[in-house]
Image: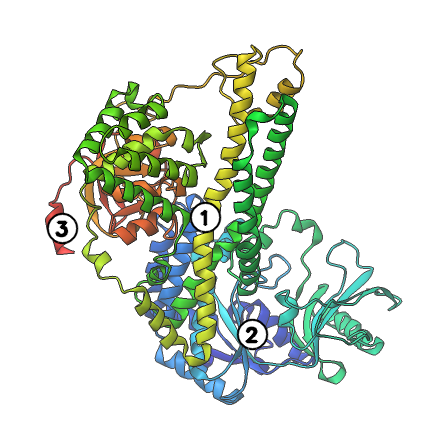
Amino acid sequence: MDSESWVIPLAEAGSADERLIGGKTAQLARLRRAGFGIAPGFSVTVTAYERFLRDNHLPRILQMELGRKPFEELRWEELWDAALRIRNRFSAAGLPADVHQAICRAVRDLGSATLLAVRSSAPGEDSVQRSFAGLHESFLNVVGEAAVVETVRLVWASLWSDAALLYRQELALDPLRSRMAVLIQEMRTEDCSGVAFGRDPRTEQNEHAVVEAVPGPCSGLVDGSVDPDHWLIHRATRQVVTYRRGHRDRDRQEEPLLARQDLESLLSVLDQVESQLGWCPDVEWTGRDSRLTILQARPITAARQEADDKRPWYLTLRPDKRRLEQLCHRVAEHLIPELRALGDGLAAEPLERLSEADLADCIQTRQTHLERWKRIYWDEFIPFAHGVRYLGLYYNDAVHPQDPYEFVGLLRGEDMLASQRNRSLQALARQVRESAELQQALQEAVEDSPGGQVAEWAVTADRLSAVAGGTAFVAAFQRLLRQFMDVAFGGHRLSDEPTPLLQNVLELAIQSACPAASEASREEPATQELEQRLFDAVGAERRDEAQGVLRLARLSWQLRDDDNLLVARLESQLLRALQLASARLKASGRLNADADVGTDAVTVVCEALRERAAAPLVLSAARPSAGHPSRRAPGETPRQLVGQPAAHGLASGNARVIRGPQDLGGFRAREVLVCDAIQPMMTHLVPLAAAVVERRGGMLIHGAIIARELGIPCVNGVANVVDLLQDGDFVTVDGFLGIVTLGAPEFNLEFAEHDT
């Protein structure tokens, strides 16, 4: 096949089929042919992309990654994982020799030392019907043949990013039929750049045009790092309706960036582009007058579509370093310290001294705090979690590891609140293990309690204190409750229910040691080795940048775990105040004795506290927590459940389904932990488990990462698993294939593990 099928110069692309060169390139090629200022460049065609896929057997990989379960059932974390694995495959795959040669020849024609922009140009991109703006990768200031080839692969891979896949699903497009061309052009950077809209994109009216400008390159405007000068201009009269100067600390210039003749020139360009292409344009530009270069032209998205368009949300899924750095500073330096201090302050308040009216005020204040921090959790804490995903992309693009999750080893050893709690539990277990008398006393205290529950912690504490080592154990356990268990889980305060934790400590003590790490776990490279791999890959000139990415990701991983527990502490403190209110109302006959008072009862409880003469309040009674009815149809026991392999290994054991706090104390060593998702409140159970099975999918969720660290098999993304499995089901967990088998295994586990 002729090399021109792989590469088409922009100067020759004016009549090329958009299906071959993509929407972005097609628009610019038409404008270039019409005489507009367009930087020289070339298109790497859809045909080249298809050849790359075929020669590297990638269609089979894509089908496998996206065919594990129906697309609409994939959680976002699972989709991100698939996108990461696909990107890793693309990055490691070689270009066919003739495609590689054609691209390198085209780069040499532009000048091997020329700064280049490498951008996506998918068929249908920048069209009237649909916009993919920002969903695919673009790279600026790329120099040299090797760098261009590498970025072309990454642009191709961005067709399969989580955001791009979700957007195509919204448009009812089959992702497996998607194709990608790549546009490569000389970089053009003038003293001033910006965007211009043929009409105000916020309205349906064509009366006004909008122009925005920033000093230097347009990238600062596009990524939001530079505040632009802004003009609203009447199209017919060319009069400026409003002007707002951008706030730029380092720019002391008082005059507008664009003079009247510059605005006139841009308005003329907008009119000509609209006449040429047939739609009202959104134009990205750089330079003035004769040096004005159009960087991109696309139709303006209709304002009426924006309310239903989820693309802005999909764009937030892309880890953005500048935004992450801003969040890192705000979360680490301000929000987490404020949240921690608020929890400490609420815990120290002597609620028992409050009048009923003051207690009502206190409850409502605590509810307000909780609601505020839940909003912050969704708006800032969750986006900051993308710091870990940014590290994944950064590490993989630089190092090209065979294992796309090798970067997770860089997060080992972060001192999270849950880790501190788990170490305290292990220390308590050692105390029990080293004293047969204490172990016996703890065993008897648990067994003597009705239903395995300790009726009164004070009674148990006295009982334990009477044996050797008991006083120290009780003091350490009370310290654990105070420091780490003042959290809410499933509507319960864990500090009020010490029995499950005592049972967990006893189980840890009886088990002589945590499960031995598997061979795969022991063979994982040390954190320092992974750091060195990254530093070697990026080179000395980018070492500081790499260290910054590492710091950001590690803080993201640590604080994204801590924030769950700190917000749960606020809920616990709200429950504490509600419990006191409930006790007072019940004692005075104003609330039924069996009422279950939760956070959904704040309003009515506060009204009852303030209005003593009101009729007694009646709330639903607490439901007994003895077991969970099976949701499996009689006689319908599934043989195999399929999910995502999240941690390698094979293990069998009895299932223990954890649905809420009432199930924590029943977990026994070498059982298979089955749950919706491992929460920070329950990570101390994982070292006891033979394996982990979760409904929630993803390689970066708590269960998956902890299981990999401990060498415990983990399968997640198993739909409805907490309904399909029951306590006591004997299951085999295959962490290599992502399969959970019910019943006795049909192979020898020891032999299978040795064989792998």
* Residue receiving disc 3: 752
On residue 77, the disc is none
The x, y position of residue 355, in whole percent, is 63, 23
Whole-number angstrom distance, CA of label 1 to CA of label 2:
54 Å
Could you tell whether 237 is left or right of 498 in the image? Answer: right
Q: Is residue 208 above or below residue 743?
A: below
Q: Residue at x 53, y 36 (%)?
A: 348
Q: Residue at x 73, y 58 (%)?
A: 201
Q: Earlier in the sequence, mark 2 or mark 3?
A: 2
* Residue receiving disc 1: 562
Q: Earlier in the sequence, mark 1 or mark 2?
A: 2
**Quadrant in the picture for the N terminus:** bottom left
Kind of residue at badge 1: Asp
**Quadrant in the picture for the C terminus:** bottom left
Q: Residues within 10 Å of mark 2 (few under 14, many from 20)?
A: some
Mark 2 vs mark 3: in front: 3
Whole-number angstrom distance, CA of label 1 to CA of label 3:
38 Å
Kind of residue at badge 3: Ala
Q: Earlier in the sequence, mark 1 or mark 3?
A: 1
Kind of residue at badge 2: Ala
Could you tell whether 430 is left or right of 577 in the image? Answer: left
Q: Is residue 354 above or below residue 419?
A: above
